Amino acid sequence: MKPLNIAAFTAASLFILSACSGDPETSYDTGDAPEAETSAAFADVSDDRLNNAAATPAEWLGYGFDREETRHSPLTGISKDNVGELGVAWTYDLATSRGVESTPIVIDGVMYVTSAWSVVYALDAKTGEELWVYDPDVDRAVGVNACCDVVNRGVALYEGKLYLGVIDGRVEALDAKTGELIWSEVTVDQSKPYTITGAPRVVDGKVLIGNGGAELGVRGYLNALDAETGALIWRFYTVPSPDKQPDGAASDSAFETVGNITWGEEGAWKTDGGGGTVWDSIIYDEETNSVIFGVGNGSPWNQTLRDPSGLDNLFLSSIVAVDADSGEYKWHFQTTPGDNWDYTATQTLIIATLPLGENGADRRVVMQAPKNGYFYVLDAATGEFISGNNYVPVNWATGLDENGRPIEVPEARYAEIPFLQTPGPLGGHNWHPMAFNPDVGLAYIPAQEIPQAYATDPRFQDNSTKWNTGADFAAGVPQVVPSEVFRFLRSGLKGRLIAWDPVAQEARWTVEHDGPWNGGVLSTAAGIVFQGKLNGEFAAYDAATGDELWVRDVKSGAASGPGTYEIDGEQYVTITTGWGSAYLLSAGGVAAPQPVQPTVGKVVTFKVGADGTIPDVDIPLVEATPKADEFGTDDQLAVGLVQYARNCTVCHGPFAVGAGVLPDLRWSSYTSSADAWKGVVVDGNLQSIGMVSFADVLSEDEVEAIRAYVVQQAHNADGINDAIASESGGLQ
Ligand code: CA
């Protein structure tokens, strides 16, 4: 196979809405917390209840519903017969236009939900009435450390307390009844670009939480903190220390026996931390008293820069099991040895019992559809590879060997020549929660196709604290007119809901969506699958056939994992929405011929027979300023295009087309003068809202070339608009 020279996909794969920082959001009055009271029985979530979540289906006790994180509710009040009568019971404004990824926890009639900047809301789950709000008051400057916006996926409840991971690396315990802070513990080296976006889990008095930051350069680990005090009980590092010496951590024996020998003696991993962040999936297997967690990508991505030895680099891109009491290593399975592509194995882990034992006997397994495109079924007790198959098209490997190791295509180990690869770094499946229905034996994967051209970044710097992956985001950026680019991009981006049979390792049915970045999945015992879509719709499908049963426009990005619960005999379905959660929501991303007004994130809750509305609440933050006059030589514009792709795309959108959350630079007043532009990009005049100086990576000539390119793109917008209008159906 030869490297494909199709260009464009570098930027295509970075249409993800936002990252970085900036805080263009309006503050809303969130009200005062009620007077503090203590109640020992309130939110009394015990290990026993968590281990038997299906026995109390009216509540949604943990991030993935149950310990197995199936997101399969036994509730059947909403049935195939009445799902068509679902209406809006209540909505609640989350006061942000940034990314919202939270799965609500519901217990004792109270919903606990998070929003951008790690703010927690306690709401009456029946009415949406606000009970209290807790804002950890994050310094907005830390937003620059967030690879993928200042999101939060939810909280944990345990014995009357609520546990929160804060974007700046704090972990905090609140009184679940009052929202009062009980303890706060900094769990990362805050001089490094760590973030926490994931939901904690609590097992036997230990709060389990990892962190993120592998795009910027950190060393990953999983912490177990004392639920009463926040004190560290054990830590499992996923990457050895730079000198391969023991850390005095639970992971020491694992590195001594299996980990250290998979790392070379040279490379950027020694200064950049090596990556391997545990930023999402953490589950507990009661049968073996194991904590099983997913490990992220290498830092930097590019293995020739990270570790030129080419060894496997454990425990990057691995599923790891440790003893819940001690954190001692039990087993691992590495999905992508020697990760080179941001192929995290942090995606949803689900434990299930499948007929995969001898003669079809039951076997307890763990399942995952990680970024690399393959669906894995492993033995939950031993990690033994049982089976795997690709759930989306894959061109970086030709299959898996008998041990589940991918058989790589040599060109995927890219260098200067770009290799157009699928999946790209956003993966065949990202953070959007997968679900599993044991009645029909199907896993529901929010899948996508977002290829990317990978090439070695010639300007890679050791020990940078900005995006620093060693993969060139200008690889394959085309020198063609924007309308062609956009047409090409759109044709290559796909999203679908796949009902995957993990025994046969094949799709049973598939629902195609308009584009990628579709939402998390909820399954119910009524045989219904709920999922948000790219275009802001929230839909219900028949679990067995994929037939659409119901759909509703929720007027914003619907990417989060939906939840369900029951109060007074009525079943509710709920989802958190957010403008910054969508991937090119409607026309706001790909084309945006004019500024699009963001909407306010919400909790939207449905029940049968309700007839509420979803109010339009826009945040007027994008002002169209007059376009600056075009300027710049061809050479200057070419430099601007490349430098924009390398430095600006991740936050401000490819080709200077705003991705939604952060300002669309084409309409920025700062483009009007070289001095104003330099003041921001070089001098850091907007540092307080998260736009840091790029003086360390860009020359002043390059900064001005980027301005020329952005202005050119502002003028090109009219042409883009015309191109889109000429296509049938327009842009959805
Ligand atoms: Ca990553």
Image (spheres, rainbow, N blue to C red):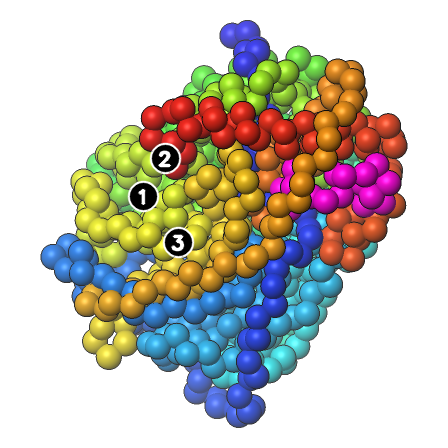
Q: Magenta includes 151?
A: no
Residue 313 visible? The answer is: no
Q: Crowding at label 2, few (<14), some or many (≥20) Cα neighbours within 10 Å? A: some
Residue at disc 2, secondary structure: loop
Q: Mark 1 Cα within 10 Å, few/some/many (few <14, many 20+)?
A: many
Up the image or down, 79 lies above or below 466; here it is below
Tell me where the magenta segment starts and ends, as one range.
663-681
Q: What type is the residue that disc 1 sits on?
A: Ala
The residue wearing badge 3 is 555
Cα separation, mark 1 vs mark 3, equals 27 Å
Q: Residue 680, percent across and down?
A: 81, 45
Q: Residues within 10 Å of mark 3 (few under 14, many from 20)?
A: many
Q: Is residue 677 magenta?
A: yes
Q: Which residue is mark 1?
A: 443
* Point 24% across, 35% down: residue: 509
Residue 31 in view in this figure: yes
> Amino acid type of disc 3?
Lys
Q: Is residue 76 above or below residue 459?
A: below
Q: Secondary structure at mark 3?
A: loop
Q: Which mark lies nearer to you, 1 or 3?
A: 3
Work out whether 8 lies above or below 257. above
Q: CA distance from mark 3 to mark 2?
A: 16 Å
Query: How far is mark 1 from mark 2, CA to CA?
Result: 21 Å
Q: Pick whichever, 544 or 476, lies toward us.
A: 476
- Earlier in the chain: of badge 1 and badge 2, it is 1
Image point (74%, 21%), residue name: 637
